[in-house]
Image: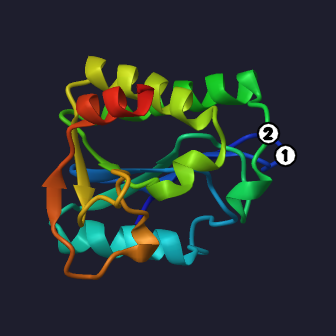
Amino acid sequence: MNWIYKTNKDNSARFVLGTEGQKPLICIGVNPSTAAPDGLDNTLKSVERHATAKGFDSWIMLNLYPQRATNPKNIHSIPDVNLHKSNLKNIKAILKSCERATIWAAWGNLIDSRSFLRSCLFDIIELSKVHNTSWINIGKVSKVGHPHHPLYLSGTAEIEQFDIETYQKNLIK
């Protein structure tokens, strides 16, 4: 297995973690924790399981914001603009390399942990429109309409189409 792994110089941010393949499931969470190749955390083990079970030959984990924090409450209270730009550059490169990519919306209610995370998502949505992607969620959305985080899904949860444009409009309200 060949790993895809991109961090900043001091490893305080992770932009990409995943495996190479022809049909990857691209998962977008809130922020990365300490996971690395050959040292996956429980979230990434769940992503890997779901990707395999749903017929994908690989998986790639991206995040709304790339700062590493084991607890989302420890994410910057004000976004680092350069970190966000680097994140978008890496996401763009991944989407460009994956024809007709499937993006798994998987940030859960954690998107509400920082007000700027919504604008990070909106920038990612714009990138996805340029690259002919389709959005999915796995399992039902939460009571407030957010797609579920991978840790909180049963192994039998089904893929559903995720209407990212309607979701975005609802977030703006």
Query: Which numbered dot is residue 151?
Result: none
Judge by depth and name the residue closer to the eye, 40 or 166: 166
Judge by depth and name the residue closer to the eye, 112 or 155: 112
Residue for point 57% across, 66% down: 37
Rendered view: 14 above or below 46: above
Query: Which numbered dot is residue 77?
Result: 2
* Residue 119 place in picture, x, y as percent: 54, 26
Q: Which residue is mark 1?
A: 10
For the residue carrying disc 1, how many other residues have a C-alpha within 10 Å: few (<14), some (14-19), or many (20+)? few
* Residue 78 place in picture, x, y as percent: 78, 32
Total labels: the figure holds 2
* Residue 52 place in picture, x, y as percent: 24, 71
Identify the residue at the far right of this view.
10
Residue for point 57% across, 47% down: 112
Q: Amino acid at mark 1?
A: Asp
Front label number (1 vs 2): 2
Looking at the picture, the colour scheme in use is: rainbow
User: Along the horizontal axis of the image, is 98 left or right of 121?
Assistant: left
First in sequence: mark 1 vs mark 2: 1
Q: Quadrant of residue 32?
A: bottom right
Q: Amino acid at mark 2?
A: Ser
> Residues under labels 1 and 2: Cα distance?
20 Å
Q: Secondary structure at mark 2?
A: loop
Question: Does residue 96 appear anywhere in the picture?
Answer: no
Q: Secondary structure at mark 1?
A: loop
